[in-house]
Image (cartoon, rainbow, N blue to C red):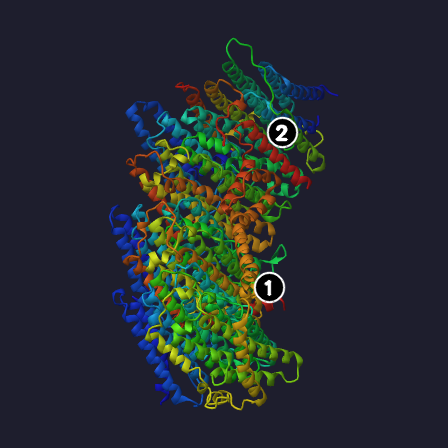
Amino acid sequence: MSSQALFSSLVLIALLPLLSALVATVIPASHRWITPLASSLLLALASILSLLLSISQWNEPTLVWEKTWFTLGESTVTAGILLNNTTLVLLSVVTFISFMVHLFSIGYMAGDKGEQRYYSILGFFTFAMLGLVLADNLLLLFVFWELVGFSSYMLIGHWREKDAATAAAKKAFIINRIADLGFIIALLIIWGHTGSFSLTSFNFEEQEAWRTGAALCLLLAVMGKSAQLPFFNWLSSAMEGPTPVSALIHAATMVVAGVFLLIRVFPLFTPLALDVVVIIGSSTAVLGALAALHQFDFKKILAYSTISQLGLLVAAVGTGAYGVALLHLLTHAFFKAGLFLGAGAVIHSLHQAQHSSHVHFDVQDIRNLGGLRKEMPITFFCFSICAAALAGLPLFSGFQSKDAILVSVFSWSGDQVWRQAFAWTIVITSVLTIFYTVRMLWFVFFEEAKKTALLTIQEVPTIMRIPLVLLSLGSLWWMVAFHPLDFSGWLLDSIQPNQEHNLFITWLSLISIPTLTVLAFLWFKYRKKPTTLGFLQEGYYLDYLNSLLVTKPILAMSTVSERIDKKGLDGIIHGFAYLTVGLAHLLAWVDKNIVDGLVDASGRLAKGFGSIARSFSGGQIQSYIFWSVFALVISLFWFLFY
Amino acid sequence: MTLVAFLFYFFIGTAALSAIVLLFLKNIFHAALALLTCLLSLAALFILLQAEFLAVSQILLYAGGVVILIIFGIMLTTKAGGQAVPITNTGLLPGLAVGAGVFFLLLFFVHKSLFALPSSAQETIVNNNIERIGIEILTDYVLPFELAGVLLLAVLMGAATIAGFKHVKN
Amino acid sequence: MHEYLLSLLIFLPLIGALIVLVLPAGTFYGRSIALLIALLQGLVFIFILAAYDTSLTGLQLAERARWISLAMGTWGEVRADYFVALDGLSLPLVGLSVFIFIIATISSWKVEKSRKGYFALLLVLNAAVMGTFCAQDFLLFYLFFEFMLLPMFFLIGIWGGARREYASIKFFLYTLLGSILILIVMIALLLSTKSSNDTGTVVHSFSITDMTNSANILSQSVLDPQRGLELFGISVRVWAFIFLFIGFGIKLPMVPLHTWLPDAHVEAPTAISVLLAALLLKIGGYGLLRITYPLFPDAAMQLSWLVALFGVISIIYGALAAMASKDLKRLIAYSSVSHMGFVLLGVASVTTEGAAGAVYQMVSHGVISAMLFLLVGVLYDRTHDRMIENYSGLSSKMPVYFSYTLLAFFASLGLPGFSGFMAEVMVFLGAFKSNGVNGLIHESFAIVATLGLVLGAAYYLWTLQRMFFGKYHFKSSTENTSLVDLDQREILMLLPLALITIAFGIFPQLLLNFINPFADSFTETVLQTGKAIQAIIRP
Amino acid sequence: MLGTNEKLEWIQLSLKYFLPELVLVGAFLILLLSSLVLNKGHQKKSIDWIALLLLMATLMASVISWNQTTANIPLFSGMLTQSTFAVYLKLLFDVAGVLTVLLSWKAYEYRKAEYYALVTCALLGAHVLVMSSNLIMVFLAIELISLPSYLLTAFVFSKKSMEGALKYFLFGSVASAIMLYGMSLLYGITHTFDFTSEVFAKAIYYQQTPFFFISVCLILAGLLFKIASTPMHPWAPDVYEAAPSPIVAFFSVVPKLAGIGILVLFCLAIDLKGNSSIRWYIVLSLIAILTLSIGNFAALLQKNPKRMMAYSSIAQAGILLIGAITLTNQGLQFMLFYATVFLLANYLVFLYIGHFERKSIVDMESYAGIGKSNAASSILLLVGLISLTGLPPTAGFLAKVFVFSSLWNSYEISGQGLYLVVFVVGLLNTVVSLFFYLKIPYQSFLKNGSNTVPSENSWGVNLLGFLLVITLLGLFFLPSGLMGWLNRITFAL
Amino acid sequence: MSLQSIYILSALLFSIGLVIVLVKRNAILVLMGIELMLNAANLNLIAFNKTVPASLDGQVFALFVMVIAVCETAVGLAIILQVYRHYHTSVPDEINELKG
């Protein structure tokens, strides 16, 4: 394939979803049934194209195309595409999952008022995400980084009449925006010290402090986008959006953009910065897992699970094993998308059932569910496969990638105690993962039916089953390597070859994970009653903290500043002027309120001054003469004696 | 002390005294008389200062013109048949203070300055002042003289117009 | 033809104003003529673009004619020229003006009250704005600068809202105060500089080009750095810089001199708000770049941190005040304060990025704020209510309107893909780089200023949530049926603006082609001259 | 010492240069006579024409003498000096005279001939005042202006008008008495009244004493009364409110400019070409800046347009004084430029104030809404007010720029901080002044009037207004012509 | 016969005239005060003329002052009469319809 053709096809892949967005926008409402089909078709095309491209370009040397975007004085900023194996993996994952989600949405979103808008933004999101993946420099990457944030905002708030949804959308965008300040500042540092936005070479000329600073700032952005501590509460709120969106954006693709960014700019990170990355990642992982264990909302369990898994990814990058992170990113994308779509299928079916039976309860609360394995066997089957992958059972992709993470973490920790402590948090996270996965499965599918018993539940339509099946297939071991216990298969070796292996860990997990799973099943089967801890359920009260530390002070400041504007600012100028003229006017001033406006101020000031000037204009001619002569005499005295 | 010197100080005294009296008189007719006294004393001083023509003019113009006009004015603006309204003061203290200030200013610096006041007046050699004044007025001062004429004409005409306006609406 | 393009641009609207005045009142000719003139200006501008050579630095398309030439005995000669020309700073702003005036004329289409006077004033304002951006002679600049005041005063004062009189007088007084400060410095400059090409007698020229050249400062004049005159312990040159800074800062407007702006905007009719925000504010930034910095580079280098500080304060303070605003138009007015703070920051950095970013921000804010004010106008036309709290769930009632609002809000809060983002990034780059390159302002200014982005997102999204999302509800005495979606005329105004802000967001080179040479030469001149003069002061 | 014959010859020679004044005296006499002859109703109308022709003739004569004057010529035994400076001011006075006649057209019919005669007399006084080089002439000329002015104030013949006249008279008499006393003291120091002479200069050079200072200040007080400048300004608002509008326009220009003219000459004399040890510029600067500020601030409170214009003219006197304090050739030329513009703009404003007054629009509030009914008049009035404020594109702006440039130049030469303070404060006063100058346009354009004023046929007024506006705009765009004239003027004593 | 005593007299007359002008509540008396001030000046002029024997400038000036004093009085009285007709008083304080 010639370079030009390659470039063109990459651009085509990126533009196909945009075309889909356009199509969705321009199709008249009378023909809205075309929209889902056309969009899915275009995405299928993109997905196939990228798969083919990935296969043909796999393990080829890195390719870069760049064109001048704009010039600033003597410096030039380019825009272009960077193509290597990482790009190809993400390209395929994004297009494929997006295609799956489109397919699923055909059923899920059927009959929704804003269906066209939905597809349009879904297409736009995919385009932006592809742009992010392909971008060859930090500025361009940032552009798409923000655009995916925007799409996320639009999709979370898709149901505009739902106040919780729009509030969640706003929250997501603003929290991301705060974290993105880090990105901008990193851009500034990098531009200021290297004079370019290049993703590959960072020529800091011995200014390691700035380099670390830039890395940490980028990390801040990653913490926002990938929902790391302390920013992760937006992700659980984001579950207010349609479930396919959660699958695509808040599980498989957008949230991992942060990890992708870390992988891309890995050379920037100094050892110190990497240590911080591990600390953030592993803390998030364990806290997320703990919170997931205490949720009752179906989607929120998955959301906290995502947070926890993202923590693992970040921690993996921090240990230096960015290839491992990419590996887990890939597997996680499949099984988490599968889980979300499974959850979506359940919610969809229950909604449909509620419609026909007029029994209403919260279908996302797992305490209301149960026993669905009989009514929805296919969904149950696919969901279980993905859940197994999440829990890390052998023969599923999750086992291999998590194994790789554990290995790399322990190899990173070496003999240092504090590092080992963080390595053990990863282990704890894995254990917790098993427990919350089982808990979820148990409540939804195994336990005897509670409120769901009142409904006649049907399996989802075929069009929604296809993605489920395909994604569960993608959650099996062969996604990683043909050897079900070896993580360094076709993928890892092409990204970061020669990864260390640790058979002890592999074997240990091989034995312990199934054991723990069984134990978990038993635990949930014979537990007394569902317990939860408030602070875990509420996501560590991060929302309250947020409101206490950020929102409230800002609102207070804004009120203050507006009040300053309306009363104080002009009042200060006013008062200052008054003081210079004389105390007498202050008395007149106190009478009236200090109102807005320099005009008022100057007007009143002038009146004060004027009334002195006028005080000898009372209409009595002798007092006129008196004042004039008086002034004359006084000034003569002044001139002569002073 | 010669007679001339005596007269000199005498008239200074009368002028000053009548002026001071003027300040405190309550009756406006008496005030006019005090003014007349003052003006006539000044005329006498003019003679002693060898300005005979001025002295004559002073008597004619001031005593004969201004004071008469003023007395007419008093009569016209005082209610007929009634007792003259006593004159009161307004803001006496500040007024006096300003007056005192002016007086102080005018006197304080005389001694300090190099003001070339001879201690006694020089005897003027020229005797015929009146003739000289006549010549000067028609040569050097012909222009002010003529302009004064124009001014007199304008003022008489204007004053007549104003004073003669009868159409008063109340 | 070529030589008179700029004059044509400036005088066309004046001719139009005369025609409008001559035509009988009460007809619809006024607005047609105004639109015709605006479109003709568009045509002229296309010719200007064709004739303009982007590869050159400096002034182009210059027209110069002797205007005032007074022999002043011992002073020599005082000379003012009719000198108009364009460079990379003027051209984008002139283009913006031409474009915005077309939009504003369309937006005024439904003005009912004394239409004749309105369009005549609009055309006069048009001429003044064009003149201000084209003039290269200080006196001519000042003439046009002041000439904007009166039409604006009447446009706000006659066609404005409930408190229009208060607002118009406040506007007028503030701006006049600024212009007097500028006048003070203008007189100082006139007498302290000479023309480059005088023979024998000293020629005091008003030409800005001549004044910029530090070789033209007369020795022993008040502004002569070697003489080093001081007032209250501060060098007179620094005073002059401060005066100019305040003068243009009022126009910009910069916190704390901004309080005229919200009032003027709230009371002004839609089209006038558009002009005010899109064009008149730009004159502040234009003045800083054209006059304040190049003419007093030494003082600029001393005080750039102060300029940047005020920039940052404006950014943060404007955003905070916007957040607390209950009136939608007031909110947007404050957002203008915030956005114009970026111009200050960019200029203060004296780097290519910063200067280019400042110009870019001016154009970008011109387009975006025009859109925002038009959108507020659309709503106000229908309901006569601008209070945010009275609305909710508008997106379902007016979907097209919602889409444009969404676009405008996101453009304004600096979403990539829109021009505002490009401008802000350039400003940040410049401000951050400055310390390393020329040591004028510290990195922390840029870093603190980025907070403005978050606050911007916060108040816009909050507004969206309050007004457009949720269940539809409109609390007012007016009939709800009046809430219809955009009509074609309104789309005709909004669509081009939207397209332009996207185009400039994706293809910044479109604009940077013009700006780059200017930004380069600006930075170089200010830094070199500034250093040279400082070397004289502190040998 | 000259003999009598030589003196008579000198008088004969002087008459040649005295043509405008002779014409004025002639005009005065003709008007007096016509008041006796033309006293029937229909004949009265011709008096306007007669006055116009006579004052035009004076203007012509002044133009002629402008053309024949190049250097200073002493006249009438040194009583007067014919100089380019004086002749230029006389030109201004004559223009003002003609405009006064035009403004009075078809109004104030009672005793019109006497009215014009008094105007002519005051004009004569102004003419003589600016030519004076002798304190006797100064005193006489001031009285020639003052006494007719007192009488003219009363020419509305109303209660208020009489009150105004009385106030004007009392204040004026006291001021002239004070000035006269100052002159008598100065005579004691210098032994001469000719303040342009060597003797005078020598005497004061050795007498830089407080006594001398007091005497000069007393004289200045009298002059400041004519200029209506602080501290001798309080009479102005009452008198302006009381007097007929054309006469107010006349008062605000002619006596003021004449006063400024003689003030400049007198200050040049006592300044001794900068050799004086008393720094007069400090005194003048303080007076100027106080006048400007007090005038502007007090004007803010006024509700009557004429009172407002009184304070405005006080403030304008401040700017004229700022032009004068530098006492340099350049500064004074610019001061004259300002004076010219001020004259035109002021007459323009009073043209319309008078015009509206006749439609019984007297208060500021009653101007509400006339921007619609009388659009042309209101716009022309607006230009006048803008010019007084000193904003482009009117000549007022350029004039202000010129005046303040000369101040800046003085600062440049001397480095005196006081100049810079005056400079900044003076210019900032413009902002204040805008506030009240805009009051009338604010009412007429922005307010909706309840009373609808009939837009009667006022093309005559508007034509005159338009001509004045054109001149004001023309002087902004093409100031070179006027400045060329002004450049001919020298300021040697 | 010292001229200084004349000078002191003149200063006294001037001051008294001024005080009368400022404090007396009668327009005609104010007029008298003004006359007093003018006379004070005249006295000075004539006295100082003694020190310049060759010239009569001071005396001539004094003459003109007298003429003008008469003119002023005439004008003043004419106005006072008219004011009296309108206001029925000649107390300046009470004539104050014109004020700011």
At label 2, the amino acid type is Asn
Q: Which mark is residue E44?
A: 2
The chain ID associated with circle 1 is C
Quadrant location, the C terminus of chain B: top left
Q: Which quadrant of the view contains residue A58?
A: bottom left
Q: Quadrant of residue A523?
A: bottom right
Query: How many numbered discs, if any?
Result: 2
Q: Are marks 1 and 2 in contact (CB under 8 Å)?
A: no
Task: Look at 35% across and 30% down and name the residue there.
Answer: D107
Check chain identity for marks 1 and 2: say if they share one. Answer: no
Task: Please say if C8 is above or below C439.
Answer: above
| Residue lying at 35% horizontally and 44% vertically, measured from the top left | D379
Placement of D274 over or under C396, stated as above or below? above
Image x and y of residue D437, in percent: 44, 42
The answer to whether residue C40 is left or right of residue A526 is left
| Element at label 1 | loop
User: What is the CA distance from the residue labelled 1 to the residue labelled 2?
Assistant: 55 Å
Residue type at the position of mark 1? Gln
Q: Position of residue D471 (x, y in %)?
A: 37, 46
Residue D273: % across, % down:
58, 48
Assign a secondary structure to mark 2: helix
From where the camera sits, is residue C417 visible? no
- Please state which of residues C507 and E25 is positioned toward the viewer in this rendering: C507
Q: Which residue is mark 1?
A: C226
The one of C470 and D290 positioned closer to us in this rendering:
C470
- Neighbor class of circle 1 (other Cα within 10 Å; few <14, some 14-19, many 20+) is some
Q: Position of residue A202 (x, y in %)?
A: 53, 81
- Among the 4 quarters of the image, the one containing residue A278: bottom right
Please report, as a chain letter, where disc 2 is located: E
Q: Label 2 crowding class (10 Å Cα cut-off): few <14, some 14-19, many 20+?
A: many
